[in-house]
Amino acid sequence: MFKKIFGSSEPKKEKILPWQALTDISQLDAIVEASNTKTQLIFKHSTRCGISSMVMKQFVSAYDLDSHIDLYYLDLLSYRDVSNEVGYKFQVMHQSPQLLIIKNGLVVAHESHGAINELDLEQYS
Protein backbone atom coordinates (compact mmCIF):
# COMPACT_ATOMS: atom_id res chain seq x y z
CA MET A 1 0.00 0.00 0.00
CA PHE A 2 2.77 2.46 0.89
CA LYS A 3 4.55 1.83 -2.41
CA LYS A 4 1.42 2.91 -4.26
CA ILE A 5 1.18 6.11 -2.23
CA PHE A 6 4.82 7.07 -1.87
CA GLY A 7 6.39 5.13 -4.71
CA SER A 8 9.18 2.64 -4.59
CA SER A 9 12.23 3.30 -2.43
CA GLU A 10 14.40 2.23 -5.35
CA PRO A 11 15.93 5.20 -7.16
CA LYS A 12 14.72 5.74 -10.72
CA LYS A 13 17.28 5.05 -13.40
CA GLU A 14 17.98 8.26 -15.23
CA LYS A 15 17.83 7.89 -19.00
CA ILE A 16 21.07 9.00 -20.61
CA LEU A 17 21.22 9.98 -24.25
CA PRO A 18 24.36 9.71 -26.39
CA TRP A 19 24.99 13.48 -26.34
CA GLN A 20 28.10 14.91 -27.90
CA ALA A 21 29.20 18.20 -26.39
CA LEU A 22 29.20 21.08 -28.87
CA THR A 23 31.98 23.29 -27.54
CA ASP A 24 33.87 24.62 -30.56
CA ILE A 25 32.87 26.47 -33.71
CA SER A 26 34.99 24.09 -35.79
CA GLN A 27 32.57 21.26 -34.93
CA LEU A 28 29.88 22.94 -37.02
CA ASP A 29 31.64 22.07 -40.28
CA ALA A 30 31.85 18.43 -39.17
CA ILE A 31 28.13 18.49 -38.30
CA VAL A 32 27.29 19.84 -41.75
CA GLU A 33 29.45 17.16 -43.41
CA ALA A 34 27.97 14.35 -41.29
CA SER A 35 24.45 15.58 -42.05
CA ASN A 36 24.89 14.35 -45.63
CA THR A 37 24.66 10.75 -44.41
CA LYS A 38 23.01 10.98 -40.97
CA THR A 39 20.60 13.45 -39.40
CA GLN A 40 22.29 15.81 -36.93
CA LEU A 41 20.47 17.38 -34.03
CA ILE A 42 21.60 20.35 -31.91
CA PHE A 43 19.88 21.02 -28.59
CA LYS A 44 20.70 24.53 -27.33
CA HIS A 45 20.20 24.67 -23.58
CA SER A 46 20.43 27.41 -20.98
CA THR A 47 21.56 25.86 -17.73
CA ARG A 48 20.10 28.78 -15.73
CA CYS A 49 16.61 28.60 -17.20
CA GLY A 50 13.90 26.53 -15.54
CA ILE A 51 11.90 26.25 -18.75
CA SER A 52 14.96 25.03 -20.63
CA SER A 53 15.61 22.40 -17.95
CA MET A 54 11.99 21.24 -18.01
CA VAL A 55 11.98 20.94 -21.82
CA MET A 56 15.31 19.08 -21.73
CA LYS A 57 13.95 16.55 -19.21
CA GLN A 58 10.84 15.99 -21.31
CA PHE A 59 12.94 15.58 -24.45
CA VAL A 60 15.25 13.04 -22.82
CA SER A 61 12.31 11.11 -21.40
CA ALA A 62 10.52 10.88 -24.76
CA TYR A 63 13.57 10.25 -26.98
CA ASP A 64 13.64 6.72 -28.44
CA LEU A 65 15.51 6.75 -31.75
CA ASP A 66 18.60 4.69 -30.89
CA SER A 67 21.42 5.63 -33.25
CA HIS A 68 19.52 7.07 -36.21
CA ILE A 69 20.51 10.62 -35.27
CA ASP A 70 23.65 12.25 -33.87
CA LEU A 71 22.80 14.36 -30.82
CA TYR A 72 24.72 17.50 -29.91
CA TYR A 73 24.26 19.39 -26.67
CA LEU A 74 25.16 23.07 -26.57
CA ASP A 75 25.43 24.83 -23.20
CA LEU A 76 24.84 28.25 -24.64
CA LEU A 77 25.93 30.09 -21.50
CA SER A 78 29.35 28.46 -21.48
CA TYR A 79 29.78 28.55 -25.26
CA ARG A 80 28.04 31.74 -26.34
CA ASP A 81 30.34 32.15 -29.35
CA VAL A 82 29.34 28.71 -30.61
CA SER A 83 25.67 29.51 -30.04
CA ASN A 84 26.01 32.74 -32.02
CA GLU A 85 27.76 30.90 -34.86
CA VAL A 86 24.99 28.27 -34.96
CA GLY A 87 22.53 31.10 -35.63
CA TYR A 88 24.68 32.62 -38.38
CA LYS A 89 25.65 29.36 -40.06
CA PHE A 90 22.16 27.87 -40.11
CA GLN A 91 20.22 31.16 -40.45
CA VAL A 92 18.05 30.47 -37.40
CA MET A 93 17.23 33.20 -34.90
CA HIS A 94 18.50 32.36 -31.40
CA GLN A 95 16.03 30.89 -28.92
CA SER A 96 16.53 29.00 -25.68
CA PRO A 97 15.89 26.18 -25.42
CA GLN A 98 16.08 25.40 -29.09
CA LEU A 99 16.33 22.28 -31.21
CA LEU A 100 17.77 22.27 -34.74
CA ILE A 101 17.48 19.31 -37.10
CA ILE A 102 20.13 19.31 -39.84
CA LYS A 103 20.09 17.18 -43.00
CA ASN A 104 22.20 17.62 -46.11
CA GLY A 105 23.82 20.72 -44.64
CA LEU A 106 20.55 22.56 -44.00
CA VAL A 107 18.24 23.07 -41.06
CA VAL A 108 15.12 21.15 -42.09
CA ALA A 109 13.24 21.90 -38.86
CA HIS A 110 13.73 23.86 -35.68
CA GLU A 111 11.61 24.65 -32.67
CA SER A 112 11.97 26.30 -29.31
CA HIS A 113 10.49 26.01 -25.85
CA GLY A 114 7.60 23.53 -25.48
CA ALA A 115 7.27 23.06 -29.26
CA ILE A 116 10.55 21.11 -29.20
CA ASN A 117 8.78 18.11 -27.77
CA GLU A 118 6.07 18.30 -30.44
CA LEU A 119 8.54 17.60 -33.25
CA ASP A 120 8.23 14.14 -34.76
CA LEU A 121 11.91 13.23 -34.92
CA GLU A 122 11.13 9.89 -36.55
CA GLN A 123 10.34 11.63 -39.84
CA TYR A 124 13.82 13.13 -39.94
CA SER A 125 15.83 10.04 -39.02
Image (tube, grey):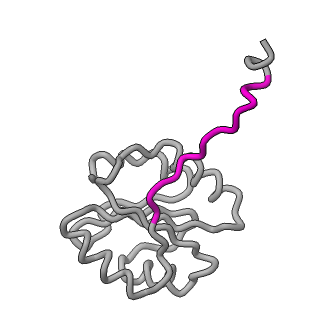
Total numbered circles: 0
Spot occupied by residue 35 in the image (x, y as percentages of width and height): 25, 69
Spot occupied by residue 81 in the image (x, y as percentages of width and height): 53, 87
For residue 4, side relative to residue 60 (left or right): right
For residue 3, side relative to residue 56 (left or right): right
For residue 53, side relative to residue 5 (left or right): left
Near-viewer residue (8 or 117): 8
Magenta stretch, residue numbers: 6-19
For residue 31, side relative to residue 15 (left or right): left
Above or below residue 63? Residue 90 is below
Q: Please tell me which residue is depicted at 45% across the width and 68% down the height of the picture.
A: 20
Spot occupied by residue 117 in the image (x, y as percentages of width and height): 48, 47
Q: Please tell me which residue is depicted at 48% across the width and 64% down the height of the picture.
A: 43
Above or below residue 28? Residue 69 is above
Above or below residue 83? Residue 101 is above
Residue lying farthest front?
Answer: 10
Q: Quadrant of residue 36?
A: bottom left
Q: Please tell me which residue is depicted at 19% across the width and 66% down the height of the picture.
A: 37
Report the magenta stretch's main SS. loop
Q: Quadrant of residue 27?
A: bottom left
Residue lying farthest top?
Answer: 1
Q: Please tell me which residue is depicted at 53% across the width and 43% down the height of the picture.
A: 61
Near-viewer residue (14 or 125): 14
Q: Is residue 86 magenta?
A: no
Spot occupied by residue 123 in the image (x, y as percentages of width and height): 27, 47
Q: Is residue 8 magenta?
A: yes
Q: Is the N terminus in the top left, top right, bottom left or bottom right quadrant?
A: top right
